[in-house]
């Protein structure tokens, strides 16, 4: 046996009381949860009484290298923010910029207990190198802007990424195809992306109905909602991960549910850019699969899924005037098991059971800010901070322990990323 987490509080995602048990890891899988499977010893044993053990968190929508643009262009709406700040800065990014920005983002996510993420961006070889280096798991997609003259090259790079993904980062990388959105990709680009996804047997990752302006423009262009447009070009038949779905109606929600679309809910980014609040109750009632995402750090500031969990809960309760909306248990499953399913990871991913990928975290529940935990589930969802995570394990390997990353000097990564950001934004 390679690793034993001894005597942790195994947290049930479906309610019920936590139970004290040990987690045994062999290779990249969980071998047993409970007593030792026979008279065995582990190479390494970590004593964990009183620490909470959860499956790793899954960030379903990110542009991880955007850490270099963290918080850039605050107080602008989506269209002005993209056109005046983000796209001009992104046009200057080099491979090395993207790699260092992505590495910073991967380490930030591991620090807070995120073990897998879905990414859409340019320079994906550089993002894959950061994933490999950091030890995190990822589903990567080369973004395709169909209105840009180089879209065919982007599509070829997307296909190349699909082909080589299984050989990258010791099997921790999978691929998707990412037509950026309805408003940036004409129908012929969508049809090509659908064909590519079908050929490679992968899903699509896109942005959907983020703002009311996007919906209005789509209706003017195509006479239908963005979700109906995706259906008309065959996109919903190949499996889709949609970010946002802020402005979807009953018919759209039924359409997404019928076709098995997964939605990445990004409440902080949607709120900060003034885009709105996604109708989570409608999506859940319709049977749409939901995960949580941060979106890029330019619009969400921190890549914390704890912040997304609590914000999702606060906003749904407020907007529906119903304190029972989006309860703690649902937020926890969205952040773990359902997020794993949205990324198409191993069917057992997101569960602490024998045979599941060994992706899990330990949380110290004794911080001043979450004591006493009069309601343990609420303390976990609304009280936990990234810095309460004391151990992150991905594919059986300890990749973060008490704020340190084995084999990686995170202060050096941070300094290099700050220097790259300054160069990029003209700050010296
Ligand atoms: Zn996005």
Image (cartoon, grey):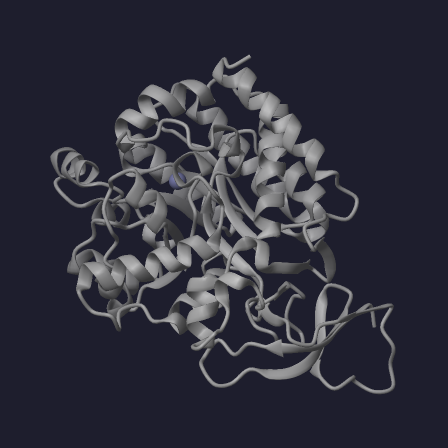
Q: Is residue 132 above or below residue 26?
A: above
Q: Position of residue 412 (x, y in %)?
A: 71, 32
Nearer to the camera, 393 or 130: 393
Residue at 27% x, 43% y is 210
Q: Position of residue 324 (x, y in %)?
A: 26, 73
- Name the quadrant of the C terminus: top right
- Name the quadrant of the N terminus: bottom right
Residue at 41% x, 59% y is 309
Q: Is residue 357 visible in the rendered structure shown here?
A: yes
| 352 sits to left or right of 342 | right
Q: Position of residue 219 (x, y in %)?
A: 13, 39
| 255 sits to left or right of 360 | left
Residue at 57% x, 48% y is 109
Residue at 68% x, 44% y is 134
The number of callouts visible is 0
Tell me where residue 44 sits by quadrant.
bottom right
Q: Is residue 338 visible in the rendered structure shown here?
A: no
Q: Is residue 377 above or below residue 253?
A: below
Tell me where residue 78 sits by quadrant.
top left
Tell me where residue 298 sits by quadrant.
top left
Nearer to the camera, 105 or 359: 105
Nearer to the camera, 393 or 146: 393
Q: Position of residue 238 (x, y in %)?
A: 40, 53
Q: Quadrant of ligand 1?
A: top left
């Amino acid at each position: 046996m390679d690793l034993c987490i001894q005597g942790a509080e195994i947290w049930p995602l479906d309610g019920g009381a936590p139970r004290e048990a040990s987690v045994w890891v062999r290779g990249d899988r969980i071998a047993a949860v409970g007593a030792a499977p026979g008279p065995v010893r582990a190479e390494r044993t970590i004593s964990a009484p009183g620490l909470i053990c959860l499956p790793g968190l899954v960030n379903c929508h990110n542009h991880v290298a955007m850490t270099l643009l963290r918080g850039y262009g605050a107080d602008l709406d989506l269209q002005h923010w993209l056109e005046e700040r983000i796209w001009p800065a992104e046009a200057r990014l080099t491979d090395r910029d993207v790699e260092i920005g992505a590495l910073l983002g991967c380490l930030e996510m591991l620090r807070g207990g995120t073990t897998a993420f879905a990414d859409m961006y340019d320079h994906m070889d550089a993002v894959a190198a950061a994933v490999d280096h950091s030890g995190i798991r990822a589903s990567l997609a080369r973004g395709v802007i169909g209105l840009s003259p180089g879209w065919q090259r982007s599509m070829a790079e997307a296909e190349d990424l699909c082909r080589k993904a299984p050989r990258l980062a010791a099997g921790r990388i999978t691929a998707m195809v990412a037509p950026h959105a309805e408003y940036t990709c004409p129908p012929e680009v969508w049809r090509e992306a659908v064909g590519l996804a079908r050929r490679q047997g992968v899903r699509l990752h896109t942005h959907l109905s983020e703002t009311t302006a996007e919906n209005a423009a789509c209706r003017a262009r195509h006479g239908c909602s963005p979700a109906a447009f995706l259906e008309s070009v065959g996109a919903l038949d190949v499996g889709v991960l949609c970010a946002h779905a802020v402005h979807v109606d009953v018919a759209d929600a039924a359409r997404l549910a019928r076709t098995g679309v997964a939605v990445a809910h990004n409440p902080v980014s949607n709120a900060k850019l003034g885009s709105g609040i996604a109708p989570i109750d409608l999506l859940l009632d319709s049977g749409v699969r939901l995960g949580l995402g941060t979106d890029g750090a330019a619009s969400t500031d921190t890549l914390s899924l704890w912040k997304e969990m609590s914000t999702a809960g606060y906003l749904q309760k407020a907007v529906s005037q119903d304190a029972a909306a989006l309860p703690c248990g649902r937020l926890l499953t969205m952040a773990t098991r359902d997020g794993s399913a949205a990324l198409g990871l191993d069917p057992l991913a997101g569960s602490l059971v024998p045979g599941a990928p060994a992706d899990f975290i330990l949380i110290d529940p004794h911080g001043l800010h979450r004591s006493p935990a009069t309601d343990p589930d609420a303390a976990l969802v609304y009280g936990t901070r990234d810095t309460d995570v004391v151990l992150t394990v991905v594919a059986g390997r300890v990749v973060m322990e008490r704020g340190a990353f084995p084999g990686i000097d995170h202060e050096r990564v941070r300094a290099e990323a700050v220097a790259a950001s300054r160069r990029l934004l003209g700050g010296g």
